[in-house]
Image (spheres, coloured by chain):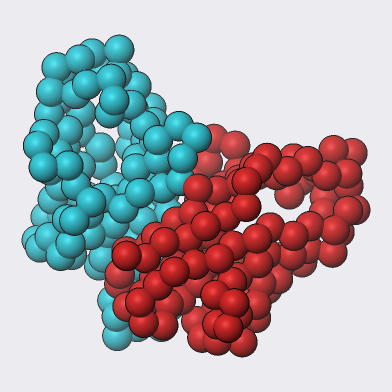
Chain colours: A cyan, B red
Amino acid sequence: NAGVMQNPRHLVRRRGQEARLRCSPMKGHSHVYWYRQLPEEGLKFMVYLQKENIIDESGMPKERFSAEFPKEGPSILRIQQVVRGDSAAYFCASSPSGARPGADTQYFGPGTRLTVL
Amino acid sequence: GDSVTQMEGPVTLSEEAFLTINCTYTATGYPSLFWYVQYPGEGLQLLLKATKADDKGSNKGFEATYRKETTSFHLEKGSVQVSDSAVYFCALTTTGANSKLTFGKGITLSVRP
């Protein structure tokens, strides 16, 4: 059973460009979470999605950031007009539905390290 | 709001030394508690968890006991190895299944031969 997959692993963008980060959850998992890890800090929650629904986006910056989890395909975290302060590691996690054992546990992908020049 | 406080780091130990990493929390309701480990250049791996008071989570020689009276979840290992060198994060969720994790800042452990 493959784990959570993220791509790309490393992404370099110039200021003003767009960044698209992809996350494929573990097989059988229908819940996806995105977290951001700034240098020398812990992970901060950004958004929680189920298929075609945003459940909690309380950690998302109000502008330039958006996320989706379509019916088919991976979850996408999109950052428009990137700035240097967006440089961070972005981690995706997934979990099974609340009705299944272990639903309180999130499994993390390897992360995408975004560098904004 | 919910928060997790970890002891300041980094921590450097000799191989076979005893390890304690402190973690305390503030939460509404009854949180589930987790320790995650992050090896260099990798994502987070679940190390252990506890879902109710007095539960003990254990894995790979690491243990942590959910102490409701002191709101703590300290991580311990009796004899560390060089391969345990990593960043350790304490975290919680407060509504059980499918809810966001709140993390501590993490602490870097270096184990020297």
**Taking A57 as reference, is B68 above or below it?**
below
Q: Position of residue A114 (x, y in %)?
A: 34, 27
Left-right relation of B60 to B53? right
Name which quarter of the figure residue A66 lies in.
top left
Residue B13 in the image, given as x and y percentages of width and height: 83, 44
Q: Nearer the viewer, residue A102 or B53?
A: B53
A70 vs B110, left or right, is left
Residue B37 versus residue A51 in the image, above or below: above
Q: Which quarter shows the C terminus of chain B?
A: top right
**Quadrant of image for the N terminus of chain B:** bottom left
Say which residue appears at 65% left-offset and 67% top-offset.
Answer: B74
* Observer able to see residue A73: no
Q: Nearer the viewer, residue A86 or A109?
A: A86
State which quadrant residue A57 falls in.
Answer: bottom left
Q: Residue at x 12, y 60 (%)?
A: A54
* Left or right: where A60 falls relative to A111: left
Q: Is residue A93 visible?
A: yes
Q: Position of residue A65 (x, y in %)?
A: 14, 39
Q: Is residue B10 above or below residue A94?
A: above
> x%, y% of residue A3?
43, 56
Report the residue at 30% width, 69% height from top.
B99
The residue at the point 23 percent across, 59 percent down is A48
* Count of all numbered marks drawn on residues in the image: 0
Left or right: B58, with B40 as reference point: right
